[in-house]
Amino acid sequence: MSDPHQVAQYAIGDAKLVRGEGVRSWDSDGREYLDCVSGTFNLILGHNHPEVMAAVREQTESLVFASSSFQTEPTNVVMQELVKISPANLTRVNLRSSGGSTANEGAIKIAQLQTGKRDVIVPFRGQVGQSMAATSFNGSSRMRAPFPYQFPGVTHVPDAYCYRCFYAQEPDSCAKLCVDRIADFITYASSGSVACVLIEPISGVGGNIVPPPGYFEDLVAFCEERDIILIFDENQTSFGRTGEMFAADHFGVQPHMMTVSKGLTGSGLPLAAILTEERMANFDRSLHGFTYGGHTLSSAAAVKTLEIVQRPGFLENVRASGKVLKDRLLDLQKDNPVIGDVRGVGLMLGVELVEPDGGKATKKTHEFQRALHERGAITRVSEHGLGNVIELRPPLVLSPEDAHLIADRFGEALDMVS
């Protein structure tokens, strides 16, 4: 049984949302909110984007669903566009999942088949998903603890959380122990047969942790030396969230595989994809497929979304609005010692709240979230509501003006909490 006190921490109000448009939503009492988390990080084009909704309506007039035994125009175009915009080494698309959990599990299957090995390495705080196997692999014991049956074969390793470094090092002089020491975990904590490393390039649920420069170059080299497949879980970081099309582009590396979902359809329809290198093209499609994977309506939404995010100026707006918001939050940090760290890239930001001694201010984080909610700003708290980081993932259509408005409400909420 789950702890009812834990569940209660999710509740920040009794609002019933009835309408959404762009970065705003309204409840049944007519109150307006700024959606600072894009629904559940998936509405990258905001609520009810008119072009996406029109594409979906048009598709309903011809074909709502097709068996995966057949091709459709929307699914074909989605796969073509994903190959076009992804890192150059990723040339194959598996479009047979409808969510991030099953896409991640499919990527693990492909890695196991490709390497003939079995174990999965996941960083501390890593969120693999909510299905049973993905739950077993999650990097938080809280997510695994309620369930007596666990899938074997995962090794958890320290993440590149520089603000609270596991190895008590400083980024300028740590020599990337969070990469090099993985070798010890493989030798002493795994079965010795490691198929893949599955990592969010910027952690989502885990607290918006951004690895330091050079981390991913070292991790790619580490994996390639050992015939380990590096999988980027870009379910939250893709399609412009970081100000680049993918976080892989931001960090300047090419993972061997990527999973994407959430923002793929722009405005809330379920769809997920696994992108792989050509060498993994022999994966039998019957080994990983779901009834609603590659759904025709969702694919129609994805086609329009992928067109929009490639338009001139789209990524520039993400970078500009993200800079406004981050700079304003950094200014607030100067006068508010409760803000221990402001970190993030583009419109994927995290604000870590701390006690005077530097400890995690979990209780105050929830008070702050409620204060933001009262000020009409919808946010989420890290670690499924039990952490000390306020997560900010507003829709990528956020204007610099609305970025200022979010920051204003942050300042007002800080005054209430202080």
Image (cartoon, rainbow, N blue to C red):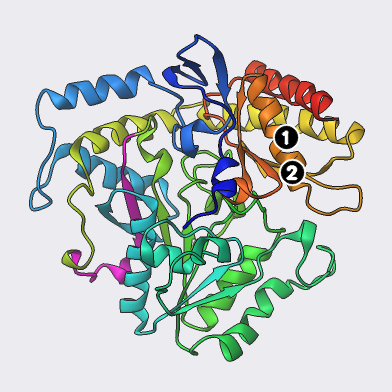
Q: Which residues are magenta?
A: 269-285
Residue type of the residue flagged with mark 1:
Glu
Q: In this view, which residue lies farthest toward the top?
A: 30
Please say if the residues under marks 1 and 2 sit with CB atoms less than 8 Å apart: yes
Q: Position of residue 123 (x, y in %)?
A: 59, 67
Answer with the quarter of the image where residue 277 lies.
bottom left
How far apart, in angstroms, are the residues tagged by discs 1 and 2? 6 Å
**Which numbered marker is on residue 312?**
none
Q: Residue at x 29, y 48 (%)?
A: 98
Residue drawn where x is 67% and y is 50% of the image: 387
- Is residue 89 visible in the rendered image? The answer is yes
Residue 278 position, x and y percent, is 31, 66
Secondary element at tag 1: helix
Mark 1 nearby-residue class (10 Å; few <14, some 14–19, many ≥20): some
Residue 222 lies in the magenta-colored region: no
Residue hosting label 2: 363
Residue 97 percent coordinates (x, y): 28, 53
Residue 7 horizontal side relative to residue 118, left or right: right
Quadrant of the snapshot with the C terminus: top right
The reply to whether the magenta stretch includes residue 280 is: yes
Q: Which residue is mark 1?
A: 367
Q: Is residue 177 above or below residue 170?
A: below
Nearer the observer, 2 or 338: 2
User: Dot 2, crowdedness within 10 Å: few (<14), some or many (≥20)?
Assistant: some
